[in-house]
Image (spheres, grey):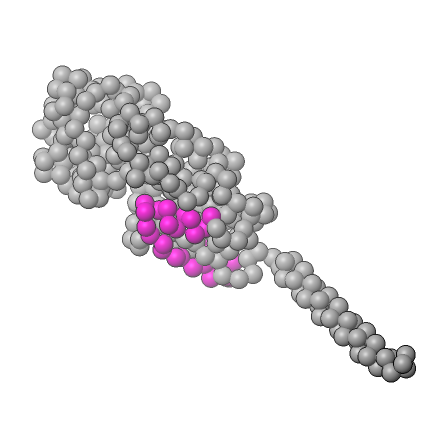
């Protein structure tokens, strides 16, 4: 009886040995793969908006430079929808291996949390901040017929004419910027929506509306042509493009700041070594003369934060808008 069982035992032992050998080979292969230097395959940068905008432009500049530096293709994927929520959610739920990144904004990681009743990710817990790549200051401009030549003039005029001055906006940042101005300056103006910031600026050029926050690249040519009047810069400091225009903060509203920033983020739990590698690459590329020239041409500033500084920016952005939205009577979607 025992003799008859021996062939089966031998076969069983051989099968077990082969299974263990295969498992060991797979483990060695996996260890070898994990030990490969990052990046060892194409990297995807998700842009949560459509092609052609500033977020897309920045992603393509970054993607090109990373491809040149790494010898690995960097793929730009536009995943537009719900004011950036769709694309941001894709990255939040991606593996934390550094191969899927987000070109986020102060919309995806700030304002949306106040403007939407349900955000499908946690802007803090679900992401590893890498760096802010760029920011654009908004320029407060008015139609030349408005008797205001400074922010102080505008505040005095708005208080003298409550509910009479029309303020145009074309998106969440400029809408909340107008509401923040109303709150801080304690004035009453009529805030009117337009289908995009370009039509909003055009409405002020035509005289249909009187005031608007516009991007510098968009409004500066109109200011130079005399079709708009610059009143104040909404950034934390004066712009390098228009250094003679004072900030709103230094013109009567201390601490006032509304800008559009754009930053690189990875899914939470991405290894710190990968985050640091990406941060270092971003710091390097932002100093390249051709990149500087390209971004300055679009009136971008380049803050180049550390991951910790970028995380602090996100926390401050999230804390800034709930009160503004509530006091403005804006109902979350």
Residue situated in front as seen by the camera: 165 or 297? 165
Q: Is residue 67 magenta?
A: yes
**What residue is rendered at 13% in x and 16% in y?**
160
**What residue is rendered at 19% in x and 38% in y?**
193
Q: Which contiguous range is marked in magenta?
A: 66-92
Q: Residue pushed farthest front?
A: 1
Can you give x and y, in whole percent of width and height, for residue 70 in the image?
52, 58
Q: Is residue 135 visible?
A: no
**What residue is rendered at 43% in x and 52% in y?**
90
Within the image, what quadrant is residue 220 found in?
Answer: top left
Rendered position, 148 above or below 284: above
Q: Is residue 315 magenta?
A: no
- The answer to whether residue 328 is left or right of residue 127 is left
Rendered position, 289 above or below 208: below
Can you give x and y, in whole percent of width and height, for residue 273 in the image?
59, 47
- The answer to whether residue 198 is left or right of residue 264 is left
- The answer to whether residue 32 is left or right of residue 300 is right
Quadrant of the image containing the N terminus = bottom right
Can you give x and y, in whole percent of width and height, for residue 142 in the image?
16, 31
How many numbered circles are shown? 0
Q: Is residue 309 visible?
A: yes
Rendered position, 188 above or below 105: above
**What residue is rendered at 49% in x and 43% in y?**
126
Within the image, what quadrant is residue 75 found in?
Answer: bottom left
Quadrant of the image containing the C terminus = top left
Can you give x and y, in whole percent of width and height, for residue 74 in the image?
45, 58
- The answer to whether residue 108 is left or right of residue 307 is left
Residue situated in front as seen by the camera: 101 or 225? 101
Rendered position, 306 above or below 255: below
């Amino acid at each position: 009886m025992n003799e008859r069982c021996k062939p089966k035992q031998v076969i069983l032992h051989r099968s077990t040995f082969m299974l263990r050998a295969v498992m060991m080979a797979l483990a060695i292969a996996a260890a070898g793969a994990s030990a490969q230097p990052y990046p060892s395959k194409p990297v995807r940068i998700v842009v949560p908006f459509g092609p052609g905008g500033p977020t897309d432009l920045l992603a393509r500049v970054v993607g090109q430079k990373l491809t040149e530096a790494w010898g690995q293709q960097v793929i730009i994927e536009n995943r537009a929808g719900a004011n950036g929520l769709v694309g941001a959610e894709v990255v939040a739920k991606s593996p934390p291996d550094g191969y899927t990144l987000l070109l986020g904004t102060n919309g995806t990681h700030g304002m949306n949390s106040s403007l939407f009743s349900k955000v499908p990710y946690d802007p803090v817990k679900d992401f590893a901040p890498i760096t802010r790549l760029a920011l654009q200051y908004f320029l407060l401009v008015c139609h030349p017929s408005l008797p205001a030549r400074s922010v102080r003039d505008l505040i005095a005029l708005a208080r003298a004419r409550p509910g009479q001055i029309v303020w145009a906006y074309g998106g969440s940042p400029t809408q909340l910027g107008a509401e923040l101005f109303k709150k801080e300056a304690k004035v009453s103006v009529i805030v009117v929506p337009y289908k995009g910031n370009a039509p909003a600026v055009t409405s002020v050029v035509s005289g249909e509306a009187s005031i608007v926050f516009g991007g510098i690249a968009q409004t500066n040519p109109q200011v130079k042509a005399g079709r708009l009047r610059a009143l104040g810069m909404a950034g934390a400091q004066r712009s390098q493009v228009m250094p003679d225009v004072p900030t709103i903060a230094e013109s009567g509203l201390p601490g006032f700041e509304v800008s559009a920033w754009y930053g690189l983020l990875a899914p939470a739990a991405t290894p710190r070594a990968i985050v640091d590698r990406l941060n270092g690459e971003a710091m390097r590329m932002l100093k390249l003369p051709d990149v500087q020239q390209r971004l300055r041409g679009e009136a971008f500033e380049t803050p180049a934060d550390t991951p910790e500084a970028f995380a602090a920016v996100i926390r401050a952005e999230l804390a800034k808008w709930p009160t503004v939205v509530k006091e403005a009577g804006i109902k979350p979607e």
